Amino acid sequence: MKVLSKLMAIVLLGVFFISGCGADETARDEKRLKLATSAEWTQRADGLPNFQQHYGFEFPELAIVDLGLAYQAVGTGLAHVGIGDATEGRIAQYDLVVLEDDRLFFPAYNPAPLVRGEILQTYPELREILYQLSSGLDLETLIMLNKKVSLEGMMPQEAARQYLLEQDLISDGRPEADPDKDRPVVLGGKTFTEALTLGYLTKYLLQDRGFRVIDQIGLGEVAVITPALFSGQIDLYWEYTGTGLMNVMNYDRVVSDPEECFELVKQWYRENHDVVWLDYAPANNTFVLFTSRELHEEHGWTGISDLGQYLGQ
């Protein structure tokens, strides 16, 4: 199904190339402002409808593509702006310019390890061990790791191990299990590139510290992995603060301040499911709107509000 979905997205992207006699005619038409977006983002609470209401303008045209193809659509001139992830390596690949969220619409999406309270009580040292990892994961580092996998062809396992060795977080050798850590840690993870890399970073770090790790990395997305954590099928995985707030808690207000968002999810998860949010990483992998370098220089777009001004001219 995933292969079919990507094929359909590629075909759809190809249609954009064919229609309108090519990229230049589409993207240079001064009467248009086309947004390349995934279908999911048009329906989310932190997505298109509320975004347009918040900023006070509407996009005249949408190009519905797979999320991973929005960067290509803008980079090749098929759309004026696109929506994507702040840590995506293809922003650098296509020399795209991220527009400032000057009205603070997008939620905070800082990744953090979630661990069941029972496991943290058994192994309280997990808090400090995982902080050694999370504290170093700033935006630049996550972009670098994502590029190694999505652009340079590294496997997430290879990128994770290389990074840990370079940071002297693990030793170069076969780790030995600590006999005193007789209870294994069941490690889960989502299925996209960054989540897989975060999972393997955690796996190799814990194994280096003597933990026995049961690998459930790539288990599934929110609808699968959250119940697995709450029910005790897994003990630990990385989640994003904004996802916990908007998708799990169904919070009715977007929170763009990272610390406020973290405090909200930390309290709710602990009180309702005895799950602990450990310290979040500095990187805020929120949604971003981006444009091409050429259009940025031509129109002077630096913030999202500039798009509304452009449409009002």
Image (spheres, rainbow, N blue to C red):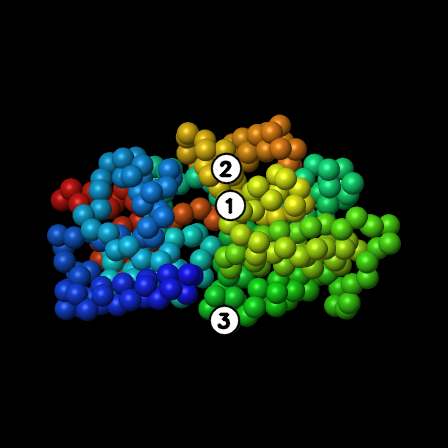
Picture residue at 77% right of the left edge, 43% below the top: 123
Q: Earlier in the sequence, mark 1 or mark 3?
A: 3
Residue 127 vertical placement versus 34 (above, below): above
Q: Position of residue 101 (x, y in %)?
A: 36, 43
Find out whether the residues at labels 2 and 3 contact each other: C-beta distance under 8 Å. no
Picture residue at 71% right of the left edge, 43% below the top: 127
Picture residue at 56% right of the left edge, 68% below the top: 155
Can residue 177 be seen in this snapshot? yes
Find out whether the residues at labels 1 and 3 contact each other: C-beta distance under 8 Å. no
Q: Left or right: where does residue 39 sit relative to residue 30?
A: right
Label 2 packing within 10 angstroms: few (<14), some (14-19), many (20+): some
**Residue bearing the label numbered 2:** 248
Quarter residue 89 falls in: bottom left
Picture residue at 86% right of the left edge, 50% below the top: 180
Q: Nearer the viewer, residue 61 or 236?
A: 236
Q: Position of residue 197 (x, y in %)?
A: 58, 59
Find out whether the residues at labels 1 and 2 contact each other: C-beta distance under 8 Å. yes
**Residue bearing the label numbered 3:** 152
**Residue bearing the label numbered 1:** 222
Q: Nearer the viewer, residue 131 or 6?
A: 6
**What is the CA distance from the residue labelled 2 to the residue labelled 3?**
33 Å
Quarter residue 88 falls in: bottom left
Instruction: Say what secondary structure mark 3 lies in.
Output: loop
Q: Earlier in the sequence, mark 1 or mark 2?
A: 1
Quarter residue 141 falls in: bottom right
